[in-house]
Image (tube, helix red, strand yellow):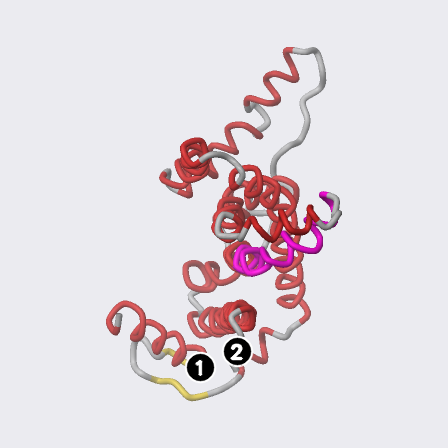
Amino acid sequence: MILFIIVPLILVFIFSFTTGDIRLNGDFQFSIENFQRFFDPLYLKVLGKSVNLALKSTIICLLLGYPMAMIISRENIKKRNVMILLFVVPMWMNFLLRTYAWMTLLGKNGVLNFLIKKLGFTPLNFIYNDNAVLLGMVYNFLPFMVLPIYSVLIKMDRSLIEAAEDLGANKVKVFLKIIFPLSLPGVVSGFTMVFMPALSTFVISRLLGGGQYMLIGNLIEQQFLWTGDWHFGSAISIIMMAFILIGMAITSKFDKEKEGGGLW
């Protein structure tokens, strides 16, 4: 942990607060210039677009994932395990390959356009736009929403639902007053587990966006691999880590409150 987590984090932290060529001759000076630079409207626009797409993908994952988690949780244990396996199996495949598969489906000469042309219609532009990037995010991160909600729903005390029904509550009231409030820890965990990787992804936007969409993850990659400005790249990484830590703190606080305690 010290070698592969602590040391790299310390190096990123040092690079973020320095300027100059620290790698070759040790000529550097401490500065907050890299963080000030990030608040340029150009980079804030990139952050805004990243947050916008991450929020959209997270909300879509919640709208799709919650009903899926409910359906799975109500099945018998044998069928339930098979359904969970169907969610997990695609995750065994490399993330990059799964994203490339969507390029094969959505491309100009892809499977979908091939079928459309066979039906006599004009091919459509499915790829290299916001919708394609959004689709890639939802596909790749949906299991991270389903599994936490599912794990909470299967532990729910069914006698509470039966008691509410005995007292005259219909299905809508049972869901709004019993099921959803009790499943909120899973919803919050799923929201965090989807939003954070969606915010920092760069592979999906590069492949399905065709390099036309600069998200915060692409900006960090660009600084390290192409521009060579490790200092600015490290500063952006520190800012992203702050986002992640805040999200984790909120999630942890919510869970603790449900248990009668608090993080802070």
- Image marks 1 and 2: residues in contact by CB distance under 8 Å: no
Q: Nearer the viewer, residue 139 or 233?
A: 139
Could you tell me which residue is drawn at 48 percent across and 70 percent down? 241
Which labelled disc corresponds to residue 262?
2
Label 2 Cα crowd, 10 Å radius (few <14 / some 14-19 / many 20+): few
Magenta range? 171-192
Q: Is 178 included in the stretch rendered in magenta? A: yes
Amino acid at dot 2? Gly
Label 1 Cα crowd, 10 Å radius (few <14 / some 14-19 / many 20+): many
Could you tell me which residue is drawn at 48 percent across and 87 percent down? 31
Amino acid at dot 1? Thr
- Quadrant of the rendered image containing residue 198: bottom right
5 displayed left or right of 199: left
Could you tell me which residue is drawn at 64 percent across and 58 percent down? 181
Tell which circle, 1 or 2, labels the residue nearer the N-terminal end: 1
Whole-percent x, y for residue 73 in the image: 52, 41
Whole-percent x, y for residue 260 in the image: 53, 75
39 displayed left or right of 154: right
Q: Is residue 236 visible?
A: no
Q: Residue furthest bottom?
A: 30
